[in-house]
């Protein structure tokens, strides 16, 4: 059948698509800006006929009734790979739980746990071209693996999505139904960096040499790095998330990808989240390559890049070097995402470095983010044996290969001055780094 006619044959309404979901089924959903807002908004309207519907999601951008409305949530159970702000509120309703993962194996492990079974996939794509090929556009982290596993594939087509290149193509033959919802794209504006974050950005930029390949995470600190890199040459991009800052570096001639060892000449990533500027940049751009998360975030793939620099943020670091980026004590906050993947991978790279950045204090300076031990219940995102470089607004601590005593000394130097004595005293009190008394003088051992 002609692709245009096949598309028309598979086109149904959003309520019709949601009506296909049955009790006790599992729906896998595209992540972040690739989520299908029409289908997800409609799902809550079917709660009265549904029970025990499981939903796999990752970093949803909008709140939906199925996970925020207490009258509706009992009909659904959400398994979430990475929490956003709305999810932290929804968690307390008891119908959502975090799925621990490393990004490059997130969908692989979830499918193994479900014995390879997924009833329904919902995602988004561009309208098909004249040969029937759609682009999965803004997300390729887990989408293709879920599509291949699902019994029923429904795509929400949005003409506003950019047509991205790489492994994003999906043919209309491989889709069961399409719905249309031509709504504005979700946009995430860059977070203006604080004074402390600008200082951190400067320290990190000093660690980035010409020809390096970058992975930058999300938030104010990664955004603060960009202005300090405008005098660099021939940087490359191999990342999980494309951001607006990368566009700035490309347009300034800083990112050329000429010295990359993999996908030479191209920026490579798994999903995009930013403003319309970013979405316009990646549309039909031959210099931008989307690959699946199982590829971009495989530490051994990451490590094949020359001078790979991974930059991610954290909530707490203790003097053992343990990094917590995903919870505040027992309270789950976000997720591991690709942090451990890229942190490990960067250290496999010739001239590479894994950087964890954080402000030295939280709660308006009331508490130190560098602590003797992680808060009770804190989830370890980067284990102490994997940690490399820690950066705050007070400087750089290179921890790889150091013993705990020396790690403590390095971290005290970049801790807020108000907490440096406390860190040393607590380390002694807890017996982590004992002190001994020699001829009446207390010295660190």
Image (spheres, helix red, strand yellow):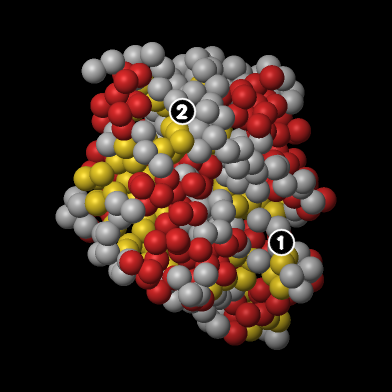
Provide residue 57's location: percent of width, then percent of height. Answer: 42, 54
Rounded to the nearest angstrom, the CA distance separating label 1 from label 2 is 43 Å
Picture disc at residue 360: 1
At horizontal 35% and vertical 19% (from top left) the residue drawn is 4
Quarter of the image where the C terminus is located:
bottom right
Callout 1: 10 Å neighbours few (<14), some, many (20+)? many
At horizontal 30% and vertical 41% (from top left) the residue drawn is 153
Residue nearest the viewer, comparing 209 with 247? 247
Residue nearest the viewer, comparing 58 with 287? 58
Q: Give the residue number, with chain letter if any, for mark 2.
A: 126
Q: Earlier in the sequence, mark 1 or mark 2?
A: 2
Is 158 placed above or below 194 here?
A: above
Provide residue 232's location: percent of width, then percent of height. Answer: 69, 23
Would you say 199 lies left or right of 102 here?
right
Q: Secondary structure at mark 2?
A: loop
Q: Secondary structure at mark 1?
A: loop
Would you say 336 lies left or right of 441 here?
left
């Amino acid at each position: 059948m002609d692709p245009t006619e096949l598309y028309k044959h598979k086109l149904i309404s959003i309520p019709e698509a949601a009506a296909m979901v049955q009790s006790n089924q599992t729906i896998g959903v595209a992540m972040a800006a690739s989520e299908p807002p029409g289908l997800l908004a409609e799902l809550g309207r079917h709660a009265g006929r549904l029970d025990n519907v499981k939903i796999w999601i990752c970093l949803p951008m909008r709140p939906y009734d199925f996970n925020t409305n207490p009258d509706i949530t009992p009909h659904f159970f959400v398994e979430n790979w990475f929490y956003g702000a709305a999810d932290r509120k929804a968690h307390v309703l008891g119908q959502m739980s975090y799925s621990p993962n490393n990004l490059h194996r997130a969908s692989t492990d979830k499918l193994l746990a479900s014995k390879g079974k997924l009833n329904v996939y919902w995602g988004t794509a561009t309208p098909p071209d004249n040969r029937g090929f759609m682009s999965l556009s803004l997300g390729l982290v887990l989408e293709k693996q879920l599509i291949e596993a699902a019994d029923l594939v429904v795509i929400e087509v949005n003409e506003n999505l950019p047509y991205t290149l790489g492994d994003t193509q999906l043919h209309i033959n491989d889709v069961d139904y399409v719905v249309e919802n031509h709504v504005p794209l979700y946009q995430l504006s860059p977070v203006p960096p604080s004074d402390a974050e600008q200082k951190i950005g400067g320290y990190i930029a000093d660690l980035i040499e010409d020809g390096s390949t970058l992975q930058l995470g999300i938030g104010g600190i990664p955004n603060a790095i960009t202005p300090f890199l405008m005098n660099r040459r021939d940087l490359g991009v191999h990342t999980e998330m494309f951001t607006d800052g990368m566009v700035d570096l490309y347009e300034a001639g800083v990112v050329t990808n000429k010295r990359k060892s993999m996908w030479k000449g191209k920026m490579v990533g798994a999903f995009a989240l930013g403003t319309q500027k970013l979405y316009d940049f990646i549309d039909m751009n031959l210099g931008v390559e989307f690959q699946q998360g199982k590829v971009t975030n495989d530490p051994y793939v990451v490590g094949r890049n020359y001078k790979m620099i991974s930059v991610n943020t954290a909530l707490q670091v203790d003097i053992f070097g343990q990094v917590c980026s995903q919870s505040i004590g027992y309270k789950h906050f976000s997720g591991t995402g690709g942090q451990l993947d890229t942190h490990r991978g960067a250290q496999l790279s010739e001239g590479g470095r894994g950087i964890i950045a954080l402000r030295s204090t939280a709660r308006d300076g009331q508490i130190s983010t560098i602590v003797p031990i992680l808060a009770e219940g804190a989830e370890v995102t980067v284990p102490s044996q994997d940690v490399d470089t820690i950066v705050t607004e007070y400087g750089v601590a290179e921890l790889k290969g150091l013993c705990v005593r020396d790690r403590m000394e390095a971290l005290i130097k970049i801790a807020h001055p108000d907490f440096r004595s406390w860190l040393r005293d607590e380390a002694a009190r807890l017996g982590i780094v004992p002190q001994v008394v020699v001829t009446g003088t207390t010295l660190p051992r």
